Amino acid sequence: MKKIKNFDLSIVVPFYKRTKFAQSIVKSLDNQNDELNLNIEVIFIDSDTVKDLSSILNQYETKSQLEIIVVSAKNIIAEKRNVGINSSRSENIVCLDDDCIPGDNFLNAHHKALVNITNQKKIFSGKVYFPRELSENSNFHRFRNERHRAYDINYIGKKNIHFTNIVTMNLSFKKSSLVNNNLFFDTEYDTYGLEDTQFGLDAVNKGFDLEVVDAQIYHADNTTLDLFANKIKSFAFNYFFRFYEKNKYLLKNQTNDSNDPNLLHQYLIKIASVNSNIRENYPYLMNFFAVLSPVFLLPLLFFIKTFLKISDTNKLFYSYSIFKLLIIVTILISMFDKNSNKGNSLQ
């Protein structure tokens, strides 16, 4: 393993059991850096999910100046990102997820953006794609790839992006800008979802600009349909009972913001506002809906999931609207169950 004193980049990767993906990440970064000739450290932050992870990853003989280290943290993704940031020995930090393989221009694009920065308070966010073999052979992954692509309008031809559109699996910034402004990931989000959105909102409130960078990653995700539905439940729980309650006075002002390009975000704010008002002033209504939910919504959710599983490999049955219905029904179920997925990391 190469010992390097001064680093041009630190790559922060929260890790959870995905050893093969981690090895692919190291190989991709090493191949890119073989041409760039940068001094790079790759920091994997694990919660003791793989024994001897450092030894396993360092079995790979790097061609470039690439140092691989493993540090420990609690099994909370926000905590892992913070530990990785604080452990970084470079001023230039790039965040990546452990199931995201860097595209060919990943290192060069992030490094170029960071070294040419004129205002320290900038955060750069790149693009996410699913590998073609996944999106072409599975309706489920085709839908998820189109959801990624739905945000392209916010990246193409635009310098700035909305705080809900940043992707922390492909993000870069100056370390000192976060430390000096006390901007870190909120560890209250200890289940799946919203820690990235909270980070984006906090960044904007602290005067940061959120800008695009032409860096691509391939989301080599192996999430099943059932796990995806559970993640939506966890997302809804975090949105309605954490994110909204934490930021509701600020968010209420955004429902009438004509400069907010994210209509979905405005709809979520309105739903969260109604949900909060009913829970506070008409709790008996929530109890009533909670009784009806298992009777009507759970059977509907079962039917939708069964249909999507059976038809997954047949393109003729692909419908973006059915997947959206799955999300809507799952969110409604979560609204009536405050404890849905509480404490489940769903990594």
Image (cartoon, helix red, strand yellow):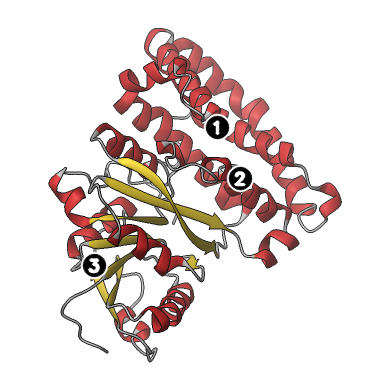
Q: Residue furthest top?
A: 281
Q: CA distance from mark 1 to mark 3?
A: 33 Å
Residue 147's tag is 2
State how far apart marks 1 and 2 are (Cα). 17 Å
Q: Residue at x 68, y 34 (%)?
A: 325
State whether residue 177 is above or below residue 261. Answer: below
Q: Secondary structure at mark 3?
A: strand
Q: Is residue 158 above or below residue 7?
A: above
Q: Earlier in the sequence, mark 1 or mark 3?
A: 3
Q: Quadrant of residue 278?
A: top left
Image coords of residue 80 (percent x, y): 28, 58
Assess disc 3: are there few (<14), some (14-19) or many (≥20) residues with their C-alpha within 10 Å of its C-alpha.
some
Q: Nearer the viewer, residue 126 or 233?
A: 126
Q: Out of 231 and 80, give the one closest to the viewer.
A: 80
Question: Going 53% across and 56% down the picture, which residue do you hit?
Answer: 128
Instruction: Point out the tag, 1 or 2, that comes first from the N-terminus.
Output: 2
Residue on which the image places disc 1? 331
Neighbour tally class for label 2: few under 14, some 14-19, many 20 plus, Cα within 10 Å: few
Q: Which mark is residue 72?
A: 3
Residue that protrudes farthest toward the left in the picture: 180
Q: Which residue is found at the position 27% from the left and 68% from the top?
A: 10
Amino acid at dot 1: Ile
Does residue 262 appear anywhere in the picture? yes
